Image (cartoon, helix red, strand yellow):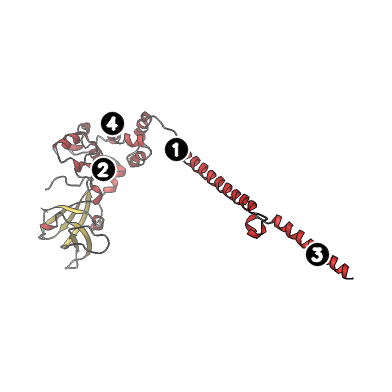
Amino acid sequence: MKKSMANTDAINIIRKSLTAEENMGTLAWYEKDLSDYSDDETLTIKLQEVDDNIEKVDSTKKKKRSKLVHSESDGKIYPADLWHLISDYICPEAVRNFALLCHDSHRVTHSVCFWQRLYKRCYVSGIELPSRLQPQCIRRVHGLRSLVISALYHVYPPFSTRLQSRTPMQADPDQLLGARCLLIWYAKVKDLWHFYFKFRLPRGRRCWLRSQSAEMDLLAADDVFYNPEDGCCILQVVLQHFVSLPSCVMGQVLVQSSVSVGHAMRYHKLRLLFSTERVHGKGLLGNGTSICLDPVLNVLVTHWWSPKYPLHKP
């Protein structure tokens, strides 16, 4: 009786050990403890396998990255003459998008022939143009781009319709916030007073500013993009009566503008706040100068390309 029980216990122990060994064989290496390994050699082998797997993953990632960079660099390079031919079919609204296609198309938009051909395609002989925008003036290279753009707002219907007369007080002076006041003048037209504020927007500074020395003036003689009025706007305010304005605002930055009902409740009142420095946020830097214009009949904002833009002080 005792011998049979001892044999049964021995058999059960053997079965448990065999089952444990089988389970150990089916377990993954990361599910086992260090005590489950018979020696250090097995552990070293497993660690070596992990290192090999990591190296394989890194190599596959590098291959994918190299393939990605290679695929991005793929493409076709067309001859520059082809872009010159395509430019003859580009409408004025699409010039910017055409210039952003590639380096060659961008180079085409900097050429003299591109702007001269664009002018010839859009020119209409029956429309009256200023003397500086006549066909014989487009032959010169200096400032050609600005002349062609100004002419398009006379002869090209999609551009000229944008500048059709609007109702009074439709212009928003807030679009000039951050611009620097360059000049102020006024003129009396019949019984009304027209006040002009010339501003330069922050992004209006171009490479023409470098032409301050005699050498740079000679180099700028062939500059197609030369435009001293680039980034400039004219704020025209029509008043019923004359208002004295401080000259100290010239050179200062417009930081705030507001349009409200005038004193007589019939017209509008325009208030402009200038500062010596540009304002980022709602705070005011430096000493501000306030100008109040009342009564205001109309407010206009004119850009340099508009036919109504005054090129010279009246």
Q: Amino acid at mark 1?
A: Ser
Kind of residue at badge 3: Asn
Give me the C-alpha separation between circle 3 and circle 1: 69 Å
Helix, strand or loop under label 4:
helix
Q: Secondary structure at mark 3?
A: helix
Q: Which residue is label 2 attached to?
A: 153
Tag 1 or tag 4, which sits nearer the N-term?
1
**Marks 4/1: CA distance?**
31 Å
CA gap between label 1 and label 2 equals 40 Å
Precedes in sequence: disc 4 or disc 2: 4
Q: In this figure, which residue is indicated by the disc labeled 3? A: 12
Residue in the image at 22% along x and 53% along y: 301
Q: Earlier in the sequence, mark 3 or mark 1?
A: 3
The secondary structure type at the circle numbered 1 is helix
The residue closer to the viewer here, 197 or 213, is 213
Viewer-side label of 3, 2: 3
